Image (cartoon, rainbow, N blue to C red):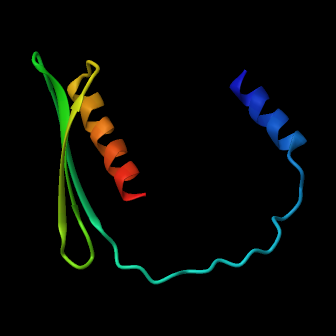
Amino acid sequence: MKGEILADFFVEKPNEDPPDTSVVKTPQDPCTLFTDGSSCVDGSGAGLILTSHEGTKFTYALRFQFTTSNNEAEYEALIAGLRITA
């Protein structure tokens, strides 16, 4: 079944090259994001430290209003950190 799906994909895929596009790179110094999530009987939460390219540190502490496993808390911490940086 999997091979049949792959074969159908190649048959239906158009044989066109993507249009030429230019990529503009803007010079930006990266920020650093440290995250840690934790879950226990009392609840779950996350800690975030965002360091700007100038060296300014922003610290965040989050408490989740839903139950999670330790792995889910880690992923939620990362997602929260990415949302803060956007």
Against 37, residue 39 (above or below) is: above
- Residue 59 spot, x, y in % from top left: 16, 54
Against 23, residue 78 (above or below) is: above
- Residue 27 spot, x, y in % from top left: 45, 84
Q: Would you identify the image quadrant in which residue 78 lies?
A: top left
Side of 35 relative to 22 (left or right): left
Q: Would you identify the image quadrant in which residue 45 lies?
A: top left
Q: Quadrant of the N terminus?
A: top right
Against 28, residue 46 (above or below) is: above
> Residue drawn 20% across and 28% down?
70
Q: Residue furthest bottom?
A: 27
> Residue drawn 84% across and 33% down?
8
> Residue drawn 55% across and 80% down?
25
- Residue 23 spot, x, y in % from top left: 65, 77
Against 43, residue 30 (above or below) is: below
- Residue 64 spot, x, y in % from top left: 25, 28
> Residue drawn 82% across and 43% down?
10
Q: Nearer the viewer, residue 15 or 75?
A: 75
Q: Quadrant of the C terminus?
A: bottom left
Q: Nearer the viewer, residue 67 or 18?
A: 67
Q: Would you identify the image quadrant in which residue 71 lies?
A: top left
